[in-house]
Image (tube, grey):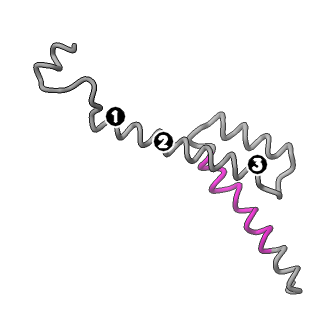
Amino acid sequence: MLAWMATQGANPVIPNRWEFTVLGIGVLALLFLIVAVIGIARSRHLSGTAQAVWILVVLAFPVAGPILWLAIGRRSTTTDRDAEKSTESGVR
């Protein structure tokens, strides 16, 4: 295989374009995973059990889990904050 690649002018040490693409997708997935786990750990609206379930979902499904957390789980955080701000300011 290396002999064929050498005759084709490809260097086996230098990554190809598709390898950079796959690496970039992997890095993005890892970043989403880290952001989701940190967001779950810092969320005050979830009980300990709910946080554990969310973390298990995120770790069990490394691509879909963070997307679900960012789309569904964080929504209740913003609505809780809005409700707290409105109660503090006297607006009901």
Q: Amino acid at mark 3?
A: Ala
The image quadrant where one finds the N terminus is top left
Disc 1 element: helix
Q: Residue at x 89, y 86 (%)?
A: 90
Disc 3 element: helix
Q: Earlier in the sequence, mark 1 or mark 2?
A: 1
Q: Position of residue 46 (x, y in %)?
A: 83, 53
Mark number, residue 19: 1
In magenta stretch: residue 74? yes
Q: Is residue 48 left or right of residue 75?
A: right
Q: Eyeballing the image, is 67 above or below 61?
A: below
Q: Residue at x 80, y 67 (%)?
A: 80
Q: Eyeballing the image, is 28 above or below 60?
A: below
Q: Which residue is mark 2?
A: 27
Q: Quadrant of residue 89?
A: bottom right
Q: Residue at x 63, y 55 (%)?
A: 70
Q: Are marks 1 and 2 in contact (CB under 8 Å)?
A: no
Q: Residue furthest front?
A: 13
Q: Amino acid at mark 1?
A: Glu
**Spatial CA span between label 2 and label 3:** 21 Å
Q: Position of residue 64 (x, y in %)?
A: 58, 43
**Spatial CA span between label 1 and label 3:** 33 Å
Q: Amino acid at mark 2?
A: Val
Q: Residue furthest left?
A: 7
Disc 2 element: helix
Q: Which residues are magenta?
A: 66-82
Q: Which residue is mark 3?
A: 41
